[in-house]
Image (cartoon, rainbow, N blue to C red):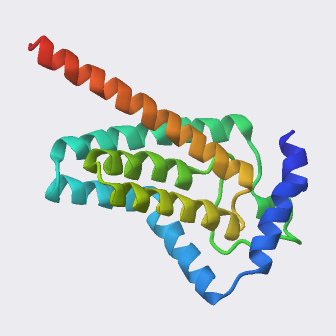
């Protein structure tokens, strides 16, 4: 099934995005690539730790580690090539990215880390900013030639599951601590 998507519509989407690119899109996508890597999330978590809420920063760090383990594990199990690796004559990588493609770590990390922050802040504007950022990462990963549509969807779904479980589990832990202090 993945092979059909990779050689079919998934490849078509990546090729179409790259065919409609320009210097501005290149710069935006490359910037999103840099800030969407793990060090970018660590810097964001440190800023939350220093300026907003230490407990939230700890939650963000723990959930980032969990989603990294989940996504890297899935990549190693699925072992699917990236578009530019599978179709070097049709897709040009606009950034250096090694390893396997599915799922997208950038998208999964964005869903978990910044989703937790947006949900914590409980303001529509921050939730909108988070969703726009995830959508931009979604686009950038395909535009850069390093992911197919199914890769970014898988990253989105894995990130959403980790975020949901993390939020539900964390709430239960703190409820237990409040009702049964040590």
Q: Is residue 128 left or right of residue 55?
A: right
Compare residues 98 and 66 and report the one nearer the observer.
66
Q: Is residue 177 above or below residue 76?
A: above
Q: Is residue 112 visible in this depiction of the protein?
A: yes
Q: Quadrant of residue 170?
A: top left
Q: Position of residue 65 (x, y in %)?
A: 41, 40
Q: Is residue 9 left or right of residue 152?
A: right
On the image, the x and y values in percent for residue 171 come to 28, 26
At 47% across and 34% down in the image, what residue appears?
162
Say left or right for 18 vs 99: right
Viewer-closest of 51 and 126: 126
The residue that appears at 51% across and 34% down in the rendered structure is 161
**Residue at 40% from the left image edge and 48% from the top image edge:** 115
Image location of residue 107, percent across then percent down: 55, 53
- Circle count: 0
Is residue 156 left or right of 83 when viewed as pictured?
Answer: left
User: Residue farthest to the front?
Assistant: 124
Q: Image height check: is 178 above or below 93?
A: above
Q: Residue at 43% x, 28% y: name it.
A: 165
Q: Position of residue 123 (x, y in %)?
A: 30, 54
Please state, as top left, top right, bottom left or bottom right, where the N terminus lies in the image: top right
Relative to 43, does residue 24 appear above or below in the rendering? below
Which corner quadrant of the image does residue 3 belong to? top right
Q: In this rendering, is residue 182 above or below 131? A: above
Quadrant occupied by the C terminus:
top left
């Amino acid at each position: 099934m993945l092979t059909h998507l990779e050689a079919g519509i998934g490849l078509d989407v990546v090729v179409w995005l790259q065919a409609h690119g320009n210097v501005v899109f290149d710069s935006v996508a490359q910037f999103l690539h840099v800030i969407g890597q793990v060090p970018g999330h660590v810097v964001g978590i440190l800023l939350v730790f220093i300026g907003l809420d230490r407990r939230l920063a700890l939650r963000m760090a723990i959930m980032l580690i969990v989603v990294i383990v989940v996504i890297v594990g899935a990549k190693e199990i699925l072992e699917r090539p990236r578009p530019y690796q599978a179709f070097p004559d049709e897709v040009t990588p606009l950034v250096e990215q090694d390893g396997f493609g599915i799922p997208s770590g950038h998208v999964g990390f964005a869903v978990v880390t910044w989703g937790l922050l947006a949900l914590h802040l409980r303001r529509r504007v921050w939730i909108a900013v988070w969703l726009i950022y995830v959508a931009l990462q979604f686009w950038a990963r395909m535009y850069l030639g390093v992911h197919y549509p199914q890769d970014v969807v898988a990253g989105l779904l894995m990130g959403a599951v980790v975020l949901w479980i993390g939020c539900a589990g964390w709430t239960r832990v703190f409820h237990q601590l409040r009702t049964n202090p040590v």
